[in-house]
Amino acid sequence: MKAQRIADLYSDYLLASFGATTATGLSELLEGEVSHDQVTRYVAGTKKTASALWRTVKSFVRDVPAEAGGLILDDSLEAKPYTDENDIVCWHYDPSTDRLLKGINCLTALYSSQGVSVPVGCHLVAKTETYLDPKTQKEKRRRPVSKNTVGQELIKQAGRNRLSFRFGLCAVWVAAADPMVFIKHTQHRDFLCPLKTNRRVALSKADKPQGRYVRVDTLELEAQATREISLEGVDFPLVLLKQVFTNEDGSISIRYLVSSETTLSFDDVTTTYHNRWGVECYHKSLKPNVALAKSPPPTVTTQPNHFFAALWGFIKLERLKMKTQLNHFTLKSNLYLHALHSAFATLRALPPVQGSA
């Protein structure tokens, strides 16, 4: 059986499963149509790359082109606390908990357009270099290239693939001078991204050459208004705005957004940036709906191949969402209910247990 066919079956298996996923489990499910060894060879075979992902999703993306679409850059961390450490399963900083966690860190380029969000590029962070920590004198791992460099490559790859999108909707780690200049000048795209509160900005063309910068969080910004500013190392103006949110516990959160498209209004910026919500749905769906965390024995080959299969499962769910107008969790719930009906009918068909009520 061809590897492509096994890959298709494996991604379906991840999508349909509700428990542990194994090569033996898939073979038994298919009643020997695919052997345990065939599944094992696929998962442990040639490592899947971003090019393989693009070939998988290309036809789907071409069906939903839109100039107003966005390319969302973000990263996620899948914790693997009980897995042996290697180049991919290693320690990464987790901003949500403000501490180091052992797991798999993935950078994703997610294409969002017309209510559809699909991964068109991905990079599993591999910390292949070791060094001696000068403070602890312990050996640690590090990546050979920075996160920003990988992010720029993902954007460049999207351009080579002729993706139709207007804005790069970036995470806060992309909001540095080099990525901004790269997106605007090299890729000829505009971007929207949040700024950290301690970033320093110049408020006029005269202030910048004089080095007169102020912290973003000290600015008096009017509600529902934008302001043109400059950043050090960025040779074009940006538009800045402030969003204020009231959390469920009554606390206040503030987000500062900047865009390279200075003609945008406050509503334009906030509405466009809201499309980044697609990446939150993407992260939320991967683990429970396509068995991302239920990976095979961890090696630097099996982990990426399982991750690729999970992404393929996500793409299939997104296709089904378009056809049925049902979200991923409803689709998965329907699969579970159908499986439960089948199991219940099978149980009822068995001979009755003696002594039952």
Image: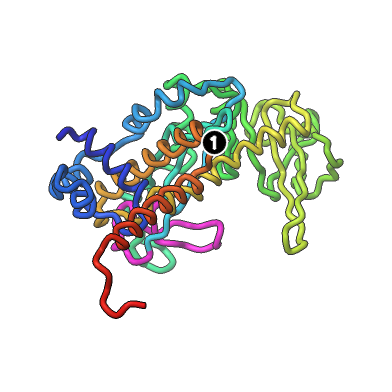
* Picture residue at 69% right of the left edge, 25% below the top: 261
Left or right of 173 on screen, residue 200: right
Q: Position of residue 216 (x, y in %)?
A: 75, 45
Q: How is the image coloured?
A: rainbow
Left or right of 263 on screen, residue 160: left
Q: Which residue is mark 1?
A: 325
Residue 316 shows in the view: yes
Question: Please, is residue 5 above or below residue 10 in the view?
Answer: above
* Picture residue at 29% right of the left edge, 54% below the top: 21
Per the image, label 1 sits on a secondary structure element best described as loop
Residue 86 magenta = yes
Residue 102 falls in which quadrant of the image? Answer: bottom left
* Picture residue at 34% right of the left edge, 53% below the top: 342
Residue 114 falls in which quadrant of the image? Answer: top right
Q: Residue type at mark 1: give it.
A: Gln
Residue 287 shows in the view: no
| Residues rendered magenta in the picture | 81-104
